[in-house]
Image: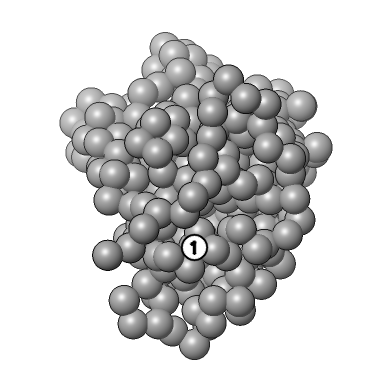
């Protein structure tokens, strides 16, 4: 019978010091049955910026909110014009060493499940096909009226046909697939309705101010409950949708290990805090564990 690591936290204590050493991280993951919670910082090495890092997009960009999208035709026009370009950039992005390392740890039996806050599909592209997409995926579109879902590529073809003279050029990409565009370019963009019911189309992602579907939240809680430790990768944990799983694991006495550049909102719950670039750190972890050679559970 496995025993959990003798790592602990106290919410009243100051966060433990950050380290660049992987020794404690390796010890936790070596025991297996780890749940992973990943954030935008894991995808920065694929060319997709995060929200809150040193060059994070929230320093310059206000993401679309759910209320604005559902209540404003102008807001939807602005979103789809900008996302029409931004999605293509994200769709062309390739998984990086960090995504591949998570897959190797999953295949090697060390990681039991993956929860990602990202909407870029890069975990799946790297081979972790069962990753739970907490905030949905830009690859899908949902009708707010009939609830039909359809591939984003299908909508992309329709938007191209509706906007043959669209000459916008993507400048700065954001994690939600949004880009910066001049107002005059946005005003000339034509949106398209649902092909089934003529309803309003929305990307199948959770906007700011929107709730994650309850069944998905419960699925994530089950993954944490079934794990012996929680490994947070590249997330500032600023929003409650991810932080709640850190709190849940810590309350249950399970070690929380955070690998991130800079501080996070969950630091006080962490038994280990590693401050290193994700790709190199996770590649080294895989090598230390021999997960690149596989493991039988």
Q: Residue 96: where, in percent of width, then height?
A: 62, 66
Q: Does 158 appear above or below 212? A: below
Q: Does 122 appear above or below 141? A: below
Left or right: 166 in relation to 180: left
Q: Nearer the viewer, residue 28 or 61?
A: 28
Q: Which residue is mark 1?
A: 29
Q: Residue 293: where, in percent of width, then height?
A: 49, 87
Q: Is residue 198 visible?
A: no
Q: Residue furthest right?
A: 54
Residue at 33% over, 63% down = 2
Q: Quadrant of residue 113?
A: bottom left
Q: Does 105 appear above or below 9? A: below
Residue at 58% over, 20% down = 12
Residue at 75% over, 50% down = 19
Q: Residues within 10 Å of mark 1 (few under 14, many from 20)?
A: many
Residue at 27% over, 51% down = 226
Q: Does 78 appear above or below 6? A: above
Task: Name the image quarter holding the C terminus.
Answer: bottom left
């Amino acid at each position: 019978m496995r025993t959990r690591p003798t790592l602990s936290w106290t919410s009243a204590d100051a966060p433990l010091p950050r380290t660049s050493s992987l020794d404690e991280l390796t010890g936790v993951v070596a025991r297996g049955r780890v749940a992973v919670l990943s954030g935008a910082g894991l995808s920065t090495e694929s060319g997709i910026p995060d929200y809150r890092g040193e060059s994070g997009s929230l320093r310059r960009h206000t993401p679309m909110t759910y209320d604005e999208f559902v209540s404003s035709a102008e807001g939807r026009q602005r979103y789809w014009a900008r996302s029409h370009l931004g999605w293509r950039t994200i769709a062309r992005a390739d998984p990086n060493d960090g995504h591949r390392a998570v897959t190797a740890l999953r295949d090697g039996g060390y990681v039991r499940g993956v929860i990602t806050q990202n909407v870029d599909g890069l975990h799946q592209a790297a081979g972790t096909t069962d990753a739970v997409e907490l905030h949905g995926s830009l690859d899908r579109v949902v009708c707010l009226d009939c609830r039909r879902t359809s591939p984003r590529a299908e909508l992309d073809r329709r938007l191209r046909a509706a906007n043959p003279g669209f000459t916008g050029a993507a400048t700065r990409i954001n994690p939600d697939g949004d880009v910066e565009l001049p107002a005059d370019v946005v005003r000339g963009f034509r949106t398209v309705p649902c092909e089934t019911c003529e309803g309003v189309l929305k990307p199948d992602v959770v906007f700011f101010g929107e709730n994650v579907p309850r069944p998905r939240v419960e699925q994530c809680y089950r993954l944490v409950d079934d794990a012996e430790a929680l490994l947070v990768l590249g997330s500032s944990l600023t929003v409650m949708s991810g932080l709640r799983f850190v709190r849940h694991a810590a309350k249950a006495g399970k070690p929380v290990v955070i690998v991130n550049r800079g501080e996070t909102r969950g630091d006080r719950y962490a038994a280990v805090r590693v401050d290193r670039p994700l790709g190199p750190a996770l590649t080294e972890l895989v090598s230390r564990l021999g997960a690149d050679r596989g493991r039988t559970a």
